[in-house]
Amino acid sequence: MNTNNQEQIEYWDKRAGPTWVDMQEHLDALLEPLSAAGLRAADAQPGERVLDVGCGCGDTSIALQGQGAEVLGVDVSGPMLEQARRRDQSVLYRQADAATMDFGGDFDLVFSRFGVMFFSDPEGAFRNLHGALKPTGRLLFVCWQAPGVNPWMSTAGRAIAPFLPASDAPSDPRAPGPFAFADKDYVTEILQAAGFSNISVTSHSTTLRVADSLAEAVAFQTRIGPAARVMSELEGDQRAAALAAVEDAFRPLDQGEGLHMGAAVWLVSAKA
């Protein structure tokens, strides 16, 4: 496995991967409205060969295979791929870095749900994915818009910001991470440079059921998303104060019927 993207590979294989496996059912349910939007837009047809980039625990790969496509799910996380195989052994999975792996050139569709924002060299990675497609092939991926329109992820981050050292303040907004592709013009530039045409970036917004209770919402935020890394580094009284701040931020949303929060993504499509 190529080491150019080694930091992200190690994070998803060693740290985030086991957590996503533990919370797979919750995360699949949470993200289902966004997964469904991406799958509708991809419109995979029976018999098509589909490369699912950053397939994780297999939710979208299983769905694509269920539509009659022939799917190869690719991810850097061994634990997540083990979970995917446990869920459906009929899907083919491979542990690899999609940024550099030679996939040949006979895929009809390259698909991804939140799996392409972590490349250290986005242009090079998409050039490689372009090479995986037939001349008639297409690309469809789902990526997050800016934190401000994704309160389900950003609310906890804002709450714990006062507890961070100044040196931990966010730097490059385009660095590998969930919001690296928040700027749709930047996404378009990358895809154009990588050789894609007929590029379309469409906004899609919805409401997600984040948790059934306030306590569940706080616990979830300490394990998944941008706030999770920060929480893992806080200790003692500082961690307790940060948790209290997160709870205070979510409390107004707890109306006794679960916590529902807004989410916004880009549906990005292109032709080879």
Image: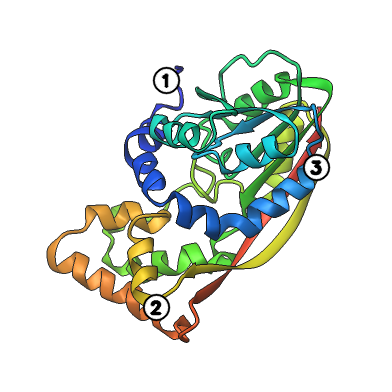
For the residue carrying disc 2, how many other residues have a C-alpha within 10 Å: few (<14), some (14-19), or many (20+)?
Answer: some
User: What amino acid is at disc 1?
Assistant: Thr
User: What amino acid is at disc 2?
Assistant: Ala
Tell me what residue is drawn at x 80 percent, y 42 percent: 43
Q: Quadrant of residue 3?
A: top left
Q: Nearer the viewer, mark 3 or mark 1?
A: 3
| Dot 3 and dot 1 residues touching (CB under 8 Å) | no
Residue where numbered disc 1 is placed: 3
Tell me what residue is drawn at x 26 percent, y 58 percent: 165
User: Which element is circle 2 on?
Assistant: helix
Quadrant location, the C terminus = top right
Residue 43 tag number: 3
Q: In the rendered image of this protein, does residue 251 appear above or below residue 147?
A: below
Q: Is 185 left, or right, of 121 in this rendering?
A: right
Residue 7 visible within the image: yes
User: What amino acid is at disc 3?
Assistant: Asp
